[in-house]
Image (cartoon, rainbow, N blue to C red):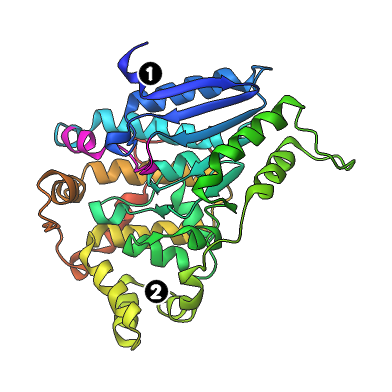
């Protein structure tokens, strides 16, 4: 087994196919080799009669997956970005496969689950958060736009919560992840081993529930998880809907920021400061992408849009600069170009959404 495959451990636990992301020192961040290994495993298991359920977890106790390996992305983008374009293509195709997987796909979003980690988990059939879960699409912080199908998830949150999360790059705790449709069940981390054992036992009995009512395999798996679930901690965002929905309903990012600053709500002022600290270009492109994602008919259509946007970001300045500021030099002082919202034109935003020869995913 080579080093790339070792970063994804795949094995059978009875009739449960277990996938463990295995880069704990790097918060299980995704390399292209890991994406390839995940795809090969899921393709093989989709027609393997021994596998009745698939469960995704992360090695270590810090998180499922912190997203893509953005250090590698930084270096590749500086060299032209061909490797990152290929990474995005294979990653988004994998996200689409997970969403349509023919067998129950269970994701344990324990700890940090961000960016690419959301793409591997939040499109699954049964999604679990714990008290340690921190879920986020923080792309605007590094000059990118929410991807891996995340723009569809954000676009379909209650009210304007998705725009708030996307423009600020703010994180969700377990209660908020459930409220926003990124997760289905809250299971305390101490109960996860017991839950995995229960899934193995259920899979050994053809996933037949005790009740006589016929159900699908996903329903049966969901019932097993629900039996181990508990009420989640309160969703902090639930009590902030009034100002979020009012402020983020504005037509432009500039108007949103103005409403946030003038709302008189301390949390709104903090949100405005977060938006203003992120890439102006990425923030404006995110607003356009999320509003368009609301109208797109499928995850596949959204992934097609995201691929165009991500490839456009690779051609710009802010992605390399954002990663430099956050993880390379860690000075947290990105020098965005353009530097202000006012300098980002409608043409700049349109460039992200326009079809690009050679940069089309073709899923929809």
Magenta stretch bounds:
60-75
Q: Is residue 217 above or below residue 129?
A: above
Answer with left or right where residue 314 lies relative to residue 32.
left
Quadrant housing residue 359: top left
Q: Nearer the viewer, residue 43 or 121?
A: 121
| Residue 130, image x, y percentages | 49, 51
Residue receiving disc 1: 5
Residue receiving disc 2: 251
Question: At numbered mark 1, what does the secondary structure look like: helix, strand or loop?
Answer: helix
| Residue 60, image x, y percentages | 37, 36
Q: Nearer the viewer, residue 73 or 110?
A: 110
Question: At numbered mark 2, what does the secondary structure look like: helix, strand or loop?
Answer: loop
Q: Residues within 10 Å of mark 1 (few under 14, many from 20)?
A: some
| Residue 364, image x, y percentages | 54, 39
Whether residue 355 appears in this view of the structure is no
Viewer-nearest of discs 2 and 1: 1
Q: Is residue 104 above or below residue 228?
A: above
């Amino acid at each position: 087994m080579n080093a790339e495959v070792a970063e994804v451990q795949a094995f059978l636990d009875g009739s449960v196919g277990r996938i463990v992301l295995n880069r704990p020192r790097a918060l299980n961040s995704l390399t292209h080799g890991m994406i390839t290994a995940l795809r090969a495993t899921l393709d093989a298991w989709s027609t393997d009669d021994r596998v009745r359920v698939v469960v995704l977890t992360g090695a270590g106790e810090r998180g499922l997956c912190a997203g893509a390996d953005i250090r590698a992305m930084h270096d590749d983008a500086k060299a032209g970005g061909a490797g990152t374009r290929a990474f995005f293509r294979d990653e988004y195709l994998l996200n689409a496969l997970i969403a349509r997987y023919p067998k129950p796909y269970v994701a344990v979003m324990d700890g940090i689950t961000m960016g690419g980690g959301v793409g591997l988990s939040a499109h699954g059939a049964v999604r679990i958060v714990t008290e340690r879960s921190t879920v986020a699409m923080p792309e605007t912080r590094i000059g990118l736009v929410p991807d891996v199908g995340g723009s569809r998830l954000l676009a379909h949150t209650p009210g304007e919560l998705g725009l708030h999360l996307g423009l600020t790059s703010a994180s969700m705790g377990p209660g908020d992840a459930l409220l926003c449709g990124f997760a289905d069940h809250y299971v305390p981390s101490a109960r996860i081993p017991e839950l995995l054992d229960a899934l193995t036992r259920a899979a050994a009995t053809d996933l037949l529930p005790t009740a006589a009512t016929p159900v699908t395999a996903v329903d049966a798996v969901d019932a097993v998880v629900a039996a181990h679930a508990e009420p989640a901690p309160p969703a902090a965002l639930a009590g902030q809907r009034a100002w979020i929905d009012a402020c983020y309903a504005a037509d432009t990012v500039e108007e949103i920021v103005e409403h946030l600053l003038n709302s008189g709500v301390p949390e709104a002022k903090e949100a405005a400061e977060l938006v203003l600290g992120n890439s102006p270009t990425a923030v404006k492109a995110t607003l356009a992408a999320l509003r368009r994602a609301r109208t797109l008919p499928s995850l596949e259509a959204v992934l097609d849009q995201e691929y165009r946007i991500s490839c456009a970001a690779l051609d710009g300045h802010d992605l390399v600069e954002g990663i430099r500021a956050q993880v390379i030099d860690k000075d947290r002082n990105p020098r965005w170009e353009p530097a202000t919202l006012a300098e980002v034109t409608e043409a700049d935003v349109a460039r992200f959404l326009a079809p690009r020869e050679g940069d089309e995913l073709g899923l929809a």
